[in-house]
Image (cartoon, rainbow, N blue to C red):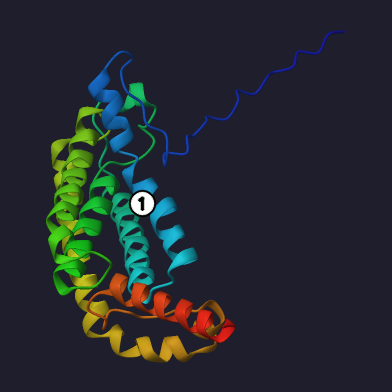
Amino acid sequence: MHHSHTTMPPPPLKAVTLVHVRYRRGDQLGHFLAWVSLVPVFISLGGFVSHFIFRRELQGMFFALGLIISQFVNEFIKTSVQQARPETCALLEMCDSHGWPSSHSQYMFFFSVYFSLMTYKGYGLFRTTSKWAVHFWLWSMAFLTMYSRVYLGYHTVAQVFAGAILGAFLGAVWFWFVNSVLIVYFPAIEESAFGRMFYVKDTSHIPNVLKFEYDNARAARKNIAAKNN
């Protein structure tokens, strides 16, 4: 007596969309834009992780926190609105996720607005003479990322513009909140157990951080040399 066994179909697979970017084979522009669309990943993993390890600035930490909050807002809106991606999502295997607003555009425009405001206020490591180059690179990457998401078929034009507008708005609001409300607590954070354990600091009151650190490093070296002599 034979028993028939019904095989269950395997569960559908879902990609980790953080680095899951596809482009048409042989399309050199698409290849370039696929790498451009990974800029948010490079900023997050390379920029902010390195920043915490080597600098531990409160401005940078709250900058990163704002980007995380922005992405939670993006996911909440996507889940609530549930607007489909363009028809090309079938080729990209992305139809199981929603498209409005674009998280890549939102990330890059939040980052660009916040960083531009930091540079304008004199926070950070860049001198006045190099600010134009920083802004040119920054906003070029923001608009290229927005364009890449449409070109590669992940989003419609409306979806990337929605992400850009929301990101710029949240970036400006978060910058105001950090530097008008939270900044008064920076000294307390520096002096807290957490601040002392991880050497967390705030240098936003120092006009030229690079020069300040350079001068102090040289002075410390000279003091050590003088003591050894």
Where is residue 108? Give x, y as percent: 25, 51
Q: How crowded is mark 1: few (under 14 residues within 10 Å), some or many (20 or more)?
A: some
| Residue situated furthest front in the rendering | 229
Q: Work out whether residue 140 or residue 103 is closer to the camera in this orientation and state it.
A: 140
Q: Work out whether residue 108 or residue 94 is closer to the camera in this orientation and state it.
A: 108
Q: Work out whether residue 216 or residue 59 is closer to the camera in this orientation and state it.
A: 216
Query: Residue at coordinates 41% horizontally, 91% vertically from top-left?
Result: 188
Where is residue 68? Give x, y as percent: 37, 61
Question: Residue 44, can we see it?
Answer: yes
**For the residue marked with disc 1, what is the amino acid?**
Ile
Where is residue 200? Give x, y as percent: 46, 78
Instruction: Give the total number of marks visible in the rendering.
Output: 1
Where is residue 164? Give x, y as percent: 17, 51
Up/down of 193 relative to 217, above or below: below
Q: Is residue 31 left or right of residue 10?
A: left
What is the quadrant of residue 129 in the picture? bottom left
The residue carrying mark 1 is 43
Question: Residue 88, can we see it?
Answer: no
The quadrant in which the N terminus is found is: top right
Q: In this view, does 21 lie to the left or right of 124?
A: right
**SS category of the residue bearing label 1:** helix
The quadrant in which the C terminus is found is: bottom right
| Residue situated furthest right in the rendering | 1
Up/down of 206 relative to 146, above or below: below
Up/down of 160 relative to 218, above or below: above
Query: Residue at coordinates 47% horizontally, 65% vertically from top-left?
Result: 54
Query: Residue at coordinates 30% horizontally, 53% vertically from top-left?
Result: 80
Q: Is residue 49 left or right of residue 31?
A: right
